[in-house]
Amino acid sequence: MFPLIIETAIPFEELEEIRRKSGAGVGLTLLGTIERNGIVLNRVLVEGPTKEIERFMGKLRLARAGG
């Protein structure tokens, strides 16, 4: 189990929905926001077993790519 911190423009509520729909056993924690090049990014801590984090990240990529 290892933590992963991602920075994304995706709203936290949408990340929670993607997590729920993916069935991945991960926890999401909003650490705060930062601004980069005029874009507000959420810093999100993703915690869980490695395979579950990979599962969540795969579903996240598909969701944002329109899959």
Image (cartoon, rainbow, N blue to C red):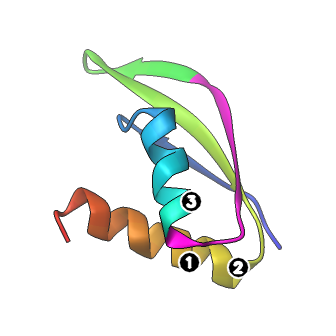
Span of residues in magenta? 22-32
Tell me whether the residue at label 2 lies in contact with that at label 1, contact meaning CB atoms closer than 8 angstroms: yes
Q: Residue furthest left?
A: 66
The x and y percentages for residue 37 are 26, 21
Q: Residue at x 26, y 57 (%)?
A: 64
Tell me whether the residue at label 3 lies in contact with that at label 2, contact meaning CB atoms closer than 8 angstroms: no
The x and y percentages for residue 12 are 50, 35
Task: Give the number of the disc on residue 50.
Answer: 2
The x and y percentages for residue 65 are 19, 63
Distance from Cα at disc 2 to Cα at disc 1: 6 Å
Distance from Cα at disc 3 to Cα at disc 2: 17 Å
Q: Nearer the viewer, mark 3 or mark 2?
A: 3
Which is more toward the observer, 27 or 34? 27
Above or below, 41 relative to 47: above
Residue count near mark 2 (Cα–Cα under 10 Å), binned few <14, some 14–19, many ≥20 = some
In the picture, the quarter occupied by the C terminus is bottom left
Q: Is residue 16 magenta?
A: no
Amino acid type assigned to the residue bearing label 2 in the image: Thr
Q: Earlier in the sequence, mark 3 or mark 1?
A: 3
Which is more toward the observer, 36 or 24? 24
Q: Is residue 27 magenta?
A: yes
User: Which image quarter: residue 53?
Assistant: bottom right
Tell me whether the residue at label 3 lies in contact with that at label 1, contact meaning CB atoms closer than 8 angstroms: no
Q: Which residue in the structure is indicated by mark 3?
A: 20
